[in-house]
Amino acid sequence: MMGLSDAKRRSRLRSRRAGRASKYQNYKPSLLRRFYTLFLRVAFKVTMRLEIEGLEHFPASGACIAMYNHIAFVDPVIVSGRFPRSVIALVKIEAYQHWLTGPLLRTFDAIPVSRGDVDRKALQAAFDVLDQGLPLLIAPEGTRSKTATLLEGQPGVAYIASHTGVPIVPVAFSGSDRWSRNIKRLRRTTIRVRVGRPFVLAADDERLSGETLKQMAAEAMVQLASLLPPEQRGVYSNLDAATARYVRFEGEG
C-alpha cells in the first residue's frame, strides 16, 4: 500500500471487512456482565482507595483504543468495572483458559490472544470491535511488568490504530501492583489511574513498514509514560529525547 494516504488505506481495509457477520453489532453487555460490574464497584470500595483523574478524556461514544500499562491482574478489571463504557479487552489465552479467571473474562466478552506469532483470529476480532464503534482495551507491552515499570511496547497497538484511524486513549496505573499483597493483609490499596488526551497515529502517505510501526508504538508508549511518575517510566524514562512524528492530537494537522 505504498503511496496511499491514511484515509484511502483505511477505506480499503474497511471495505474488505464489510459484510462479515459481527458478534459485536448492536452490542449490549449481558445481564451477568452488568451484575459483575456492580459487584466489582462494591469490591473496589472495600479493597481500594481508587483515584481516577482525567476520565473526561475517555470518549463518550465511538471506537477507541484504551492503552494501559499492565502492572497487576486488577488493572483491566478496574477499567471494565469503573469506566463509563463497556470495553472489550484483549487478554492472553492462558488467563482466558484458566479455571478461575476464564469464566469472568468470557462474561466480559474478552478476546483471547495467543502470544508469539501473529494471532490473526484475535486481530480480526479486534478490528471487528472497533468497526462496531466500541472501545478496545489493549496492554501494548504484551505482558505484565513484574517491576511496575514500562517495558518496550509491541507494534500490535500501532498496527491496529494505524489501520483503523481510531483514537488511542492512554490509561496509566500506579499502585495496583501492591493490591494483591495488601488484600492478604486486609489492607486497602491506594491506586491512581490517569487518563490522558486521545490521539491518533497517522503515517500520512508513508509505507507502513515494520520499522514505521515500531516507531509508532514507541511514540504511543511515550504518551503513556508521560502520565506516570518518573520511577515507573522504565525504558521510556528519557521523555526529552522522545519524538512524536506520528502522533496527532485533536485539532492538530
Image (cartoon, rainbow, N blue to C red):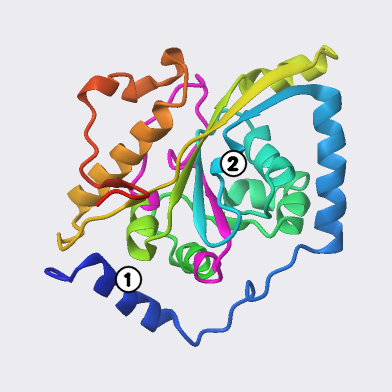
Q: Position of residue 79 (x, y in %)?
A: 65, 42
- Disc number at residue 180? none
Looking at the rendered structure, the kind of residue marked 2 is Glu
Badge 1 element: helix
Determine whether, in the image, residue 209 is placed left or right of residue 79: left
Q: Which residue is mark 2?
A: 56
Q: Is residue 237 above or below residue 93?
A: above
Q: Is residue 187 above or below residue 63?
A: above
Looking at the rendered structure, the kind of residue marked 1 is Arg
Magenta segment: 129-157
Badge 2 element: helix
Which of the 4 image quadrants contains residue 208? bottom left
Which of the 4 image quadrants contains residue 52? top right
Determine whether, in the image, residue 194 is placed left or right of residue 220: right
Q: Residue at x 63, y 71 (%)?
A: 24
Q: Is residue 138 magenta?
A: yes
**Residue found at the far bottom of this picture:** 19
Q: Nearer the viewer, residue 210 or 197?
A: 197
Q: Residue at x 27, y 55 (%)?
A: 202
Q: Is residue 250 magenta?
A: no
Give the Cα separation between the discs numbered 2 and 1.
28 Å
Q: Nearer the viewer, residue 232 or 151?
A: 232
Q: Residue at x 47, y 22 (%)?
A: 228
Of the image marks 2 and 1, the number of the one nearer the N terminus? 1
Q: Residue at x 69, y 40 (%)?
A: 77
Q: Which residue is mark 1?
A: 10
Q: Position of residue 149 (x, y in %)?
A: 45, 21
Q: Quadrant of the N terminus?
A: bottom left
Q: Nearer the viewer, residue 111 or 59?
A: 59
Q: Position of residue 94 (x, y in %)?
A: 61, 47
